[in-house]
Image (cartoon, helix red, strand yellow):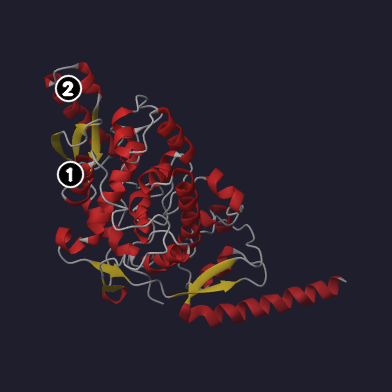
């Protein structure tokens, strides 16, 4: 079988556009994207958000820009549409719309070289600012234009199924676009703090739902993770009764957001962003999470306006199969003609331990290419008979 020519493995890092510490180039690694073959492409369609009267907390203005956040949202629209990952902006971390300089990183090959250039430009800017405090607020933001275009392409594999999950869960369909912010639809996204998958779910969040075992991590299964994300967002809304707050709670933690609303006696996200004094506890990523979501929502909804022609990836030609017996990963790879990378794209929920040979237990659901489904069934049937015969002899 011809190997998949689209991107197989992204950098094993979080690729959320607001990830990483201030000025941290290394935490914003550009995914390695390969070419796309014509047979893998299909027409993109604008999102359809109609007919959501049954969705929790939904109305026509549910995702309008909160008062006071207009400039913040525009900043993130610019990040997604004006600047590529070969450039970035140095801006004020408190007033993000205050952009001091565009930094060109083209031609710089190592992260150290890029970081050095950013630090040098920051030093020059700080020297001309009125106060040391302004200099301390300088922050570098890597551009996301090319990454967002890639994310829109890869979203075509999963987004329609994700929309159905959210509709069935009665959660607003717009919220599926949080995956653009969390991971840029990178199914291999892993954060240095332990978040994983396109929804960047933390281990302690997933464990109560029995999503993690030594060989299977359902946080990395796009649709299983989407089911949990819908559930978590419903819970957040039930606690906070506001989608701006509930979405912020997805990043910051709903209990923390609830405490802030009580301490500052406001349920307006814009007021909290302006007034919460502890920037350490309510950090840059949390303060900007909802704004970056609204920006991603706007950009993806009007992708042709911002990027010209855009396309979707076709869904993977996959078929699910529940293992009747325990197997080793190398047998699964054989159903992909030995292409380990392709096997991982189809089965990102199989862990490193599984890929290293730890037995994958019976009843685990895996995905195989549709044209290899019968081959896999025959192989598993033979294995099942062999195991049954060995058990019989053992008695």
Q: Position of residue 375 (x, y in %)?
A: 55, 81
Q: Is residue 81 visible?
A: yes
> Element type at marker 1?
loop
Give the left or right position of residue 160, taking residue 361 as reference.
left
Q: Residues within 10 Å of mark 1 (few under 14, many from 20)?
A: few
Asked whether 61 or 293 is in front, the reply is: 61
Give the left or right position of residue 128, taking residue 170 as reference.
left
Residue visible at 36% across and 53% down in the picture: 178
Name the residue beneath numbered marker 1.
107
Q: Judge whether 267 appears above or below 353 on screen.
A: above
Residue visible at 33% across and 43% down in the picture: 289
Q: Is residue 220 visible?
A: no
Name the residue beneath numbered marker 2.
126
| Quarter of the figure with residue 313 | bottom left
Q: Residues within 10 Å of mark 2 (few under 14, many from 20)?
A: some
Q: Residue furthest right?
A: 395
Q: Quadrant of the C terminus?
A: bottom right
Give the left or right position of residue 143, taking residue 286 as reference.
left
Asked whether 388 or 265 is in front, the reply is: 265
> Element type at marker 2?
helix
Residue 12, numbered circle: none
Q: Give the mark toward the camera: 1 or 2.
A: 2
């Amino acid at each position: 079988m011809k190997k998949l020519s689209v991107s197989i493995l992204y950098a094993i890092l979080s690729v959320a556009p607001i990830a990483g510490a201030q000025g941290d180039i290394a935490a914003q690694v550009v995914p390695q994207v390969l070419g796309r073959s014509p047979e893998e492409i299909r027409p993109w369609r604008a999102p359809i958000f109609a007919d959501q009267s049954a969705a929790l907390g939904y109305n026509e203005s549910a995702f309008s820009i909160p008062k006071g956040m207009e400039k913040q949202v525009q900043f993130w629209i610019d990040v997604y549409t004006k600047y590529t990952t070969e450039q970035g902006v140095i801006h004020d971390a408190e007033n993000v719309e205050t952009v001091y300089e565009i930094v060109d990183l083209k031609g710089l090959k190592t992260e150290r070289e890029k970081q050095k250039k950013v630090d040098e430009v920051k030093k020059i800017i700080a020297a001309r600012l009125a106060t040391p405090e302004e200099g301390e607020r300088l922050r570098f933001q890597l551009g996301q234009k090319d990454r967002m275009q890639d994310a829109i392409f890869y979203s075509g594999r999963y987004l329609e199924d994700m929309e159905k999950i959210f509709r069935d869960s009665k959660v607003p369909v717009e919220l599926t676009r949080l995956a653009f912010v969390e991971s840029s639809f990178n199914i291999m996204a892993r954060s240095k703090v332990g978040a994983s998958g396109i929804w960047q779910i933390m281990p302690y969040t997933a464990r109560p739902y029995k999503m993690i075992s030594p060989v299977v991590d359902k946080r990395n299964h796009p649709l299983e993770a989407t089911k949990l994300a819908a559930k978590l967002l419903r819970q957040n809304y039930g606690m906070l009764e506001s989608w701006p707050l509930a979405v912020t709670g997805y990043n910051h933690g709903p209990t923390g957001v609830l405490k802030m609303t009580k301490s500052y006696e406001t349920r307006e996200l814009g007021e909290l962003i302006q007034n919460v004094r502890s920037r350490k506890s309510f950090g840059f990523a949390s303060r900007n999470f909802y704004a970056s979501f609204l920006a991603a929502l706007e950009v993806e909804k009007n992708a042709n306006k911002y990027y010209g022609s855009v396309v979707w990836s076709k869904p993977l030609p996959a078929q699910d199969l529940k293992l009747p017996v325990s197997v080793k990963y190398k047998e699964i790879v054989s159903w992909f003609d030995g292409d380990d990378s392709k096997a991982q794209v189809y089965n990102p929920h199989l862990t490193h331990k599984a890929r290293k040979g730890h037995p994958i237990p019976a009843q685990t659901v895996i995905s195989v290419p549709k044209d290899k489904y019968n081959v896999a069934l025959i192989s598993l049937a033979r294995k099942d008979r062999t195991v049954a015969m060995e058990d019989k002899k053992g008695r």
